[in-house]
Image (cartoon, grey):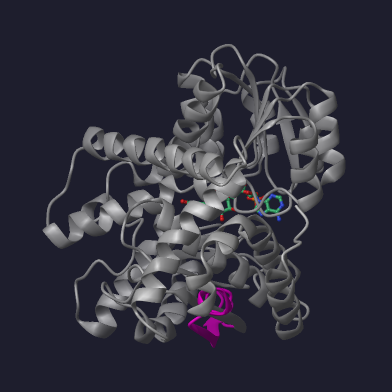
Amino acid sequence: MAIKNAYLLDLLQRVEKRNPNEPEFLQAVTEVLSTLEPVIEKRQDLVDAGVLERIVEPERQITFRVPWVDDNGKMHVNRGYRVQFNSAIGPFKGGIRLHPSVCPSIMKFLGFEQVFKNSLTTLPMGGAKGGCDFDPKGKSDNEIMNFCQSFMTELYRHIGADCDVPAGDIGTGAREIGYMFGQYKRITGQYEGVLTGKGLTYGGSLARKEATGFGLCYFTNEMLKANGTSFEGKTVLVSGSGNVAIYACQKATEYGAKVVAMSDSNGYIYDKDGIDLDAVKQIKEVERKRIKEYLSYRPNAEYHEGCKGIWTIPCDIALPCATQNEIDGESAAILAKNGCKVVSEGANMPSTPEAIETYFANNMLYGPAKAANAGGVATSGLEMSQNSLRLSWSFEEVDEKLHNIMISIFNACDKASKEYGMEGNYMAGANIAGFIKVAEAMKAQGNV
Ligand code: NDP
């Protein structure tokens, strides 16, 4: 959506000037500002309070050296980050990404998105993101532990249960969170809920592992219901084969859909009979191998090199669950041409602006990431609550709370889209509903 409002255009130009060479961050800011026009027209008080100028600038950005030694005694140096974007409605909260592509632009786009997402969850959490340009692939457990300890040896001074609570993301799963938690405890002597996604034996929450994928399907199910349809009998593509993808595949299948494809950064598998999720879990969660190993479990399936090809498979529903900008305009056009009616995002910002335009031009239902994948952070919020209470809830209790949160997120997006004259545009609804809560809190707290 093009920005017409003169104030927003001027603001965007200032953001572009101040953040050159940060394409992902500018993409995320442009998308949000392009949907806030009707809010700005109604709420001059928020403009006067300088809320918008502040919301596009992180409160604090930390960059640090992460030296670690590999199994052969060789020293490596990576660069670590924590971007504490906004703490108006609660302590900073957001994951840690370990991937060679990690850079300031990716950290800032993820931190910015997290502010609105966390606001939508209804829980008191500000937005942040962190990470490192470290590649966990092919590293031994010992190397991963050395790296995680070094990373935390710097990060610990910037985080805490009441100021900033990191979690997992790409490359950071239960193993990495465990090593980081151990090092935090060792340095500070504090046993506190400073990280979420912890193991169940030391303060983790049941259903956290499943939460983002399950939450994506709960949100998508509400969106489908509101538009007179359901998952039942639908053919679904799920990109990625990591934490989000696996549990999205599981819940979509439980809802009666058939998931026929999954991927990793090398290629994708197509199984017309429906994905055997036990095989994927064994390959990815236990053996940490590549998705092409799937053929040794299901020889009739196909494997193709290159991840983009997954979007050429005909489907009713696409659930991108791998990484940013994985669906471009061309892939979106192929999805539409092949009859795909729904795209709902498990990954953060997986659709390029051209892809999103294509969804709208083809009247597809579009579930934007900051709403559709908010179940992970929502359940991290529930993990924080359990840690504060020093209690553990059952899987069913957490899952039910998650389900209700996802229903309320969908309703908030739907309501805001209607209230601001963009019915059915859940992207605008998510941005507006997420923004207003944070903006009101920022205005109330003065010029900080
Ligand atoms: P994982 O590391 O568990 O899995 C990531 C998956 O995506 C892997 O299959 C990986 O393949 C693939 N992938 C990663 N980078 C690329 C790339 N550049 N090109 C193609 N494929 C890629 O991460 P998660 O499942 O946790 O995260 C997936 C997405 O969901 C991310 O966008 C993340 O920010 C988002 N998300 C995650 C949440 C969570 O709770 N974990 C919460 C909300 C959002 P390979 O193994 O080959 O790298």
Q: Is residue 24 left or right of residue 148?
A: right
* Above or below, 157 relative to 219: below
Residue 234: percent from left, percent from top: 62, 16
Number of marks present in the image shown: 0
Residue pictured at 21% horizontal, 56% vertical? 385
Residue 57 included in the magenta stretch of the image: yes
> Residue shown at 53%/18% (left/top)?
230
Q: Is residue 232 above or below residue 226?
A: above
- Does residue 77 appear left or right of residue 408 in this picture? right
* Quadrant in which residue 431 is drawn: bottom right
Nearer-the-camera pick, 250 or 1: 1
- Asked whether residue 88 appears in the rendered view, the answer is no
- Looking at the rendering, the stretch of residues picked out in magenta corresponds to 51-74
Q: Position of residue 297 (x, y in %)?
A: 61, 24
Residue 320 rendering spot, x and y as whole percentages: 65, 40
Tell me what residue is drawn at x 65 percent, y 63 percent. 33
The residue positioned 78% from the left and 78% from the top of the image is 21
In the image: residue 46, left or right of residue 178: right
The magenta stretch spans residue 120: no
Residue 291 in sight: yes
Q: Nearer the viewer, residue 181 or 416?
A: 416
Front-most of residues 438 and 252:
438
